[in-house]
Image: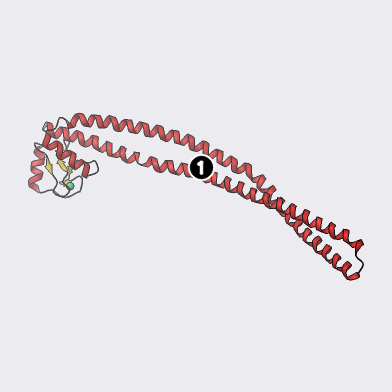
Amino acid sequence: MTEELQILWSLRDLDDRLVTLETALRRYPGERKLLEQRSSGEKARLEAHKQRLHDLQLRHRQSEKDIEALQAEERKFQGQLPLVKKNEEYQALLKEIGDRKAKRSDRETDLLGLMDDEQRLQTERPTLEHALKTAETETAARLLVIAEGERREREQVEALEAQRQQLVVRLGPFIRSRYERIRVSKEGRAVVPIIKGSCGGCFRGQPPQALQEARRRDRVLNCDGCGRLLIWPPDVE
Ligand SMILES: [Zn+2]
C-alpha cells in the first residue's frame, strides 16, 4: 500500500470516530431542553396554584365586605321600624329586611365554600413546592453530568481533529483538496472501503477493471456513484 493510501486509510478511521462523536454531541441541546421543560412545568403548576389561591382570597374579602354591607342595610331598616306610622310602610321595611337576610345567608354559604377551597389549596401547596424543588435539584445534577459528558466528548473531538490535521498535511495538495471537498459534501466521510466489490459509502457495485486496480493498492479510486475515495482494505486479500 502506498503511503498516500495508508494516510487516507488512517483518515477514514479518524473521520468515522469524528462523525460518531459529532452525532453524539448533537443530542445534548435536546436533553437540556427536556430537563428544563420539566422544571419549568413544575414551576408553572406552582404559579397557577398561587394564582388560584390569590383569586380565592380576593373573592373571600369581597364576600366579607358584601356581608358587612348587607348587615348595615339590615340594621338601618331595623332602626326605621319604630319610626313608621303606616302598616304598609312597616310591611315594606320588613320585606327589605327579609331580602337582606336572605342575601346575607347566600353570601355566607358562598364564603364557607371559598374558605374550604382555600384550605384545600393551602394543604396542596407543600406537595407542589416539593415537586418543584425535586425537579430543580435533579435538573441541576443532571445538567452537570451532561456538561461533563459534553466537555469530554469535545476534548476527544479536538484530539482527533489534531491527529487528522497531522495526517492531512502529509497528503499531496491535489488529493488533499479532493479529500477535504468530499469530506464536507459527504457528512464527514470521504474515504470508504470497497466491500464485496461495492462502494462502502453508497453500495454501488464497482466495475471489474476498477476492482483490479484498487486491489493493487497503488492509487486511490473514485466511486462513480457518490464520488467518495475508494480503498481496498489493507486486511482483505
Ligand atoms: Zn459510492
Q: Position of residue 170 (x, y in %)?
A: 15, 30
Q: Secondary structure at mark 1?
A: helix
Q: Splitting the image into 4 quarters, where does residue 2 fall?
A: top left
Which sits in the foreground, 97 or 172? 97
Q: Is residue 207 visible?
A: yes
Drawn side of residue 117 relative to residue 206, left or right: right
Which sits in the foreground, 31 or 122? 122
Q: Splitting the image into 4 quarters, where does residue 166 fall?
A: top left
At x 52%, y 38%, the residue is 136
At x 18%, y 42%, the residue is 182
Rate crowding at label 1 as few (under 14), some (14 to 19) or many (20 or more) other CA atoms within 10 Å: many
The amino acid type of the residue labelled 1 equals: Ser
Q: Position of residue 32 (x, y in %)?
A: 43, 40
Drawn side of residue 132 relative to residue 57, left or right: left
Quick one: which residue is furthest to the bottom in this view?
Answer: 88
In this view, 190 is above or below 104? above
Q: Splitting the image into 4 quarters, where does residue 177 fall?
A: top left
In this view, 148 is above or below 54? above
User: For mark 1, what is the residue?
Assistant: 39
